[in-house]
Amino acid sequence: MGDLYEELKERLKQEKGVALATVVRGEEHVGAKLLVLPDKSTRGTLGNAALDALVVEDVVVIDARSAFATRERFPHADELIVAWPDEVLERMELYPSTSVAVLTHDPKFDEPTLKVVLSHQVGYVGAVGSRKTKEERDERLRKQGLAEEQIRRIHGPIGLNIGATSPEEMALAIMAEIVATRHGKDAAAVLDWTKKSGTP
């Protein structure tokens, strides 16, 4: 375990990609850790080969536009799929632990995708766009038969308002909102807490 922590510390120090998975609850192997590197090699184990394999899986980018779904644009994606997102998602297994970020700015991609994911109990659904864009999109989705409860599940504008400007900061804002949602704290609740606590 000491070697695993040393490698994690060294990679963080050098700002190299790395992920650390830990079993936090269950009947066995609580506390077991798995270090996952960008090339999908691993250190350690969670005590179950099937669980290790699931953790190593990370990110799938889906876009029907072949000019956009390229290795140059998404060098760290595990899989690039050139197809209509809603058609692909219809065939995928979506879980309460699944997070979906819809980022195309194009209703003909966004809205069919949202209709599919909102028919499942996924953990998080976010979509880009201004508040005005969100209002217009919500109205179109209502006309397409989505219920208010489904529409309320869409986080938009996507991500917590942390003043993000760069792609990396926007990714951080989205991940922060995903974590907040997972713990039952929506964006409004988190912002309200920061105001009350005086956190800048």
Image (tube, rainbow, N blue to C red):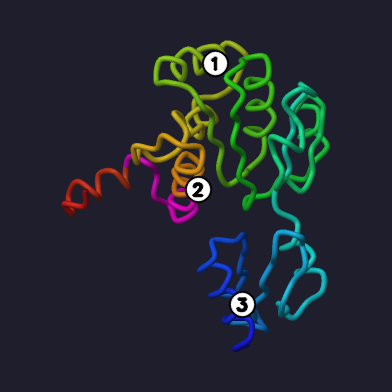
Name the residue tied to disc 1: 142
For label 1, the SS is helix
Amino acid type at circle 2 is Met
Graded by Cα atoms within 10 Å as few (under 14), some (14 to 19) or many (20 or more), the crowding at tag 3 reads some
The label shown at residue 175 is 2
Q: Is residue 185 left or right of residue 85?
A: left
Mark 1: which amino acid?
Arg
Task: Specify start and end residues of the magenta stretch as a single range.
Answer: 178-188
Q: Amino acid at mark 3?
A: Glu
Furthest toward the bottom, the residue is 2
Instruction: Tell whether position 172 is magenta.
Output: no
**How far from the left and from the top, in percent, is residue 164?**
39, 37
| Label 2 vs 3, first from the N-terminus | 3
Reply above or below: 183 against 27: above
Query: For the residues marked 3 and 1, what is the alpha-carbon distance in whole angstroms?
Result: 50 Å
Q: Nearer the viewer, residue 86 or 22?
A: 22
**Which of the pair 185/54 is nearer the observer?**
54
